[in-house]
Image (tube, grey):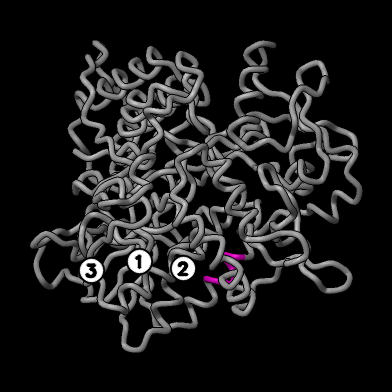
Amino acid sequence: MSGGDDVGPLDLLVLGSGVAGLSAAVRAAASPGMRVGVLTKAALDQAATRWAQGGVAAVLSTDEDSTDLHLADTLAAGAGLCDVDAVRVMVDEGPARVHELIALGAVFDRDQKGALELAREGGHSWPRVVHAGGAATGVEVERALVEAVHATAAAVLQGWFALDLLVEGGRCVGVEALDVTGRGRRVVATHVLLATGGAGQLFSVTTNPAESTGDGQAMALRAGVAVADVEFVQFHPTALHHPSAPRPLLSEALRGHGAVVRDAVGERFVDELVTRDELSRAITMKMAEQGVDHLWLDVTGLERFDQRFPTIAATVRAVGLDPGVDWLPIAPAAHYLCGGVVTDLDGATSLPGLWACGEVACTGVHGANRLASNSLLEGMVFAPRVVEAIDAGRDGPLPTGAMRAVLGAEGDDEIAVGGRWVCRAISVTPTGERAGGDLVERSRRLRETMTSGAGVVRTEASLRSALAALEGLAHDWRGQPGVAAQEWENLLTVGRAVVQAALARAESRGCHWRADHPEPDPALRLRLVTQP
């Protein structure tokens, strides 16, 4: 591309417009003289954040809760793979970030006395989760941040699609992109922040929007940037079983208020407040045992349902269900990628000039399984740290947080349990059949392959079959121009990384469950780093 096609130069280019990206853009725009741009492939307010029904977990009451308890709950959910320093940063800085969001205009639910209503969700030892509109927290967070970004001087490139990272002289200097007309452009920036979200579209059933195609993770992998923990795909246990896409969430808050999970014959069989991985696994196994494709969530005992959960009430009534009378059909759906692009405690990746935060990143906060309502909080906390580090003159990573698994740290006790294992390509034989079909057919087959082979319950056989099928899909792919084709390639890239890491992790831990290795292996209490 010629120089005339360049956009910029910018000081900071933010890729993505969810809570992480917009939080960074708002903070950066307040930095004197910093030229900031936000590039998003959809409208500014169409990120996965707006679909988040769960709230924001933060210690906002000092009565009996504490940041130490929040830390302990997060570590317990993470099954031995959380980075303690990263979690400490999140729980300590989280309350101030929530208050900053309120100052920007976000309106959270309050009781009759005007105090914030705090809910308890699965895996939390104490009520500490704030919600907006009952179960419309993501919509409210996104609204407040979008308004704040529009009020800044940030350049907003809506409808643009980032194709690949620009790397010159060993550092990231921008991205190659398609603009809103489909024309190839270069967006040049001193620093690039990946905040592109997750990859839920890898699976047939997901709570993620159509935009969640693993673009940031795939660009990082193609550029040789370290990625880790991608085997840990969290499935939300109580997605509404309905043809809607994305699947509507029946929020964790429902179970926190007393909703009951029932099997096909109406029996209660599980503690509803266990962590998401445990509940998803219990539901999946019960469905297999009873030969059904969904179970039930009984919310009939919840008082003032329409008032307390207006968004969910509207959703279920729209499909002909009465929450006061009907049990709601549920099944697990792909929800959150716990791993991603490895960062230090300030969001720096292994490639100088490239930063990451939010679901695209592996900060070490989530470990093997994300604790409910920590995702919005993680983005709100680590995005400002990126901007602060850039302001301080940082350019590359330090051996802190999850980045210790890549760089190491001499004399660091964490290395014993957070060490590095590089997952290299695993030899497979592609399926004999040619993939054929258009992109729609290829996408369907990719999602079915990942769902059957690398879903809630996995085995070596299912994973090797999935990897062979993915290689078969790639075998005769010649590539096509356009956003849809690039998204498909990105999903294929990330899908292969997920399956390869899941094969290497021959144990069960957190939301990675190997039926052929049902117990955790102490020797695998480490971070698997995927690099070409």
| Amino acid bearing label 3 | Asp
Secondary element under disc 1, as helix, strand or loop, is strand
* Viewer-proximal residue among 522 and 180: 522
* Viewer-proximal residue among 104 and 62: 62
| Amino acid bearing label 2 | Leu
Residue at horizontal 13 percent and vertical 73 percent from the top:
4
* Prevailing secondary structure class for the magenta stretch in the rendered image: helix
Secondary element under disc 2, as helix, strand or loop, is helix
Which quarter of the figure has residue 327?
A: top right
Q: Mark 2 and mark 1 in contact? Answer it, CB < 8 Å.
A: yes
Taking 297 as reference, is 16 above or below it?
Answer: below
| Residue that label 1 marks | 14
Residue 395 numbered tag: 3
Residue at horizontal 52 percent and vertical 33 percent from the top:
510
Q: Tell me residue 220's x, y (percent).
A: 26, 49
Which quarter of the figure has residue 248?
A: top right
Question: What separation in Å lies between label 3 and label 1 (alpha carbons)?
Answer: 16 Å
Q: Earlier in the sequence, mark 3 or mark 1?
A: 1
Q: Tell me residue 470's x, y (percent).
A: 30, 24
Q: Tell me residue 226's x, y (percent).
A: 26, 46
Secondary element under disc 3, as helix, strand or loop, is loop
Badge 3, how many Cα within 10 Å: few under 14, some, many 20+?
Answer: some
Residue 22 numbered tag: 2
Q: Which residues are magenta?
A: 141-145
Taking 275 as reference, is 462 above or below it?
Answer: above
